[in-house]
Image (cartoon, rainbow, N blue to C red):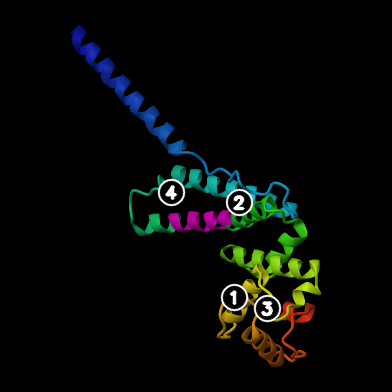
């Protein structure tokens, strides 16, 4: 009799334990919440963007908890592939996409500032329509304009000049369809290519680099 009572007691404990575990599991999602990227620009020029980023993270994490509690679906690692699960997962994907959109912008800004750029230049980069993958091209163009402004007379260029400035100009001309060597040496063929570019764009076609021609080349 005693053994039967003990057995029943153990069974009752197991049932209670299982119910407690089920309730705990229902209200505690597996894994960790999405956390903000440590490489974002905490001094981003637009404070609203930073606030929206943190809000988007909270919305995504709240959605994860809601989907787990109400639908028993871990949207980050779903066990099933039925239509209902797909709908819930799609909802999370959209919210995570908003997080990534803000995050990419904030990480890019931090990277640019670490390389010496300021808020004004970050804004110029964003307003230009460039994407993150075009960042290196943006930096090169910034280098060309700043190099020219440092000594306009020197960088108007003449036959025989040899420099990284010429090399980058030749790269731009090639991308615009001009068949010239890219060797950093300013020869007659490069001068003629610049002249042809100036003529095509309604500029004074002398084959020399000035502020206007450079501006058109960098567009």
Decide: marks 1, 2 in contact (CB < 8 A)? Answer: no
In front of the other: label 1 or label 4? 1
In the picture as drawn, the residue positioned furthest to the top comes out as: 2
Cα separation between marks 3 and 4: 61 Å
Give the camera-side residue of 182 and 130: 182
Comes first in the chain, label 3 or label 4? 4
Q: Residue at x 74, y 67 (%)?
A: 147
| Stretch of the chain drawn in magenta | 89-100
Instruction: Tell me if residue 131 can be seen.
Output: no
Question: To which residue does mark 4 refer?
Answer: 76
Q: Tell me the tag on residue 160.
A: 3
Query: Is 143 left, or right, of 7 in this rendering?
Result: right
Decide: marks 3, 4 in contact (CB < 8 A)? Answer: no
Cα separation between marks 1 and 3: 18 Å
Comes first in the chain, label 1 or label 3? 3
Decide: marks 2, 4 in contact (CB < 8 A)? Answer: no
Cα separation between marks 2 and 4: 16 Å
Residue 144: horizontal and vertical position, in percent? 70, 69
Comes first in the chain, label 2 or label 3? 2
Cα separation between marks 2 and 3: 56 Å
Question: To which residue does mark 2 refer?
Answer: 56
Comes first in the chain, label 2 or label 4? 2
SS class of the residue under badge 2? helix
SS class of the residue under badge 4? loop
Question: To which residue does mark 1 refer?
Answer: 171
């Amino acid at each position: 009799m005693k053994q039967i009572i003990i057995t029943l007691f153990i069974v009752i404990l197991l049932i209670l334990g299982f119910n407690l575990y089920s309730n705990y599991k229902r209200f505690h999602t597996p894994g960790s919440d999405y956390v903000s990227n440590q490489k974002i620009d905490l001094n981003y020029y637009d404070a609203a963007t930073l606030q929206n980023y943190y809000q988007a993270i909270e919305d995504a994490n709240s959605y994860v908890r809601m989907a787990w509690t109400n639908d028993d679906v871990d949207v980050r690692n779903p066990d099933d592939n039925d239509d209902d699960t797909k709908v819930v997962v799609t909802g999370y994907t959209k919210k995570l996409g908003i997080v990534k959109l803000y995050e990419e912008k904030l990480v890019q800004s931090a990277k640019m500032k670490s390389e010496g750029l300021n808020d004004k230049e970050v804004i110029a980069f964003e307003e230009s329509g460039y994407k993150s993958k075009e960042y290196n091209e943006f930096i090169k163009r910034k280098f060309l304009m700043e190099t020219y402004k440092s000594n306009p007379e020197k960088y108007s260029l003449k036959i025989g000049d040899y420099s990284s400035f010429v090399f980058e100009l030749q790269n731009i001309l090639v991308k615009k369809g001009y068949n010239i060597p890219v060797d950093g040496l300013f020869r007659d063929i490069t001068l003629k290519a610049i002249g042809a570019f100036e003529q095509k764009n309604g500029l004074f076609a002398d084959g020399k680099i000035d502020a206007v021609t450079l501006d058109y080349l960098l567009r």
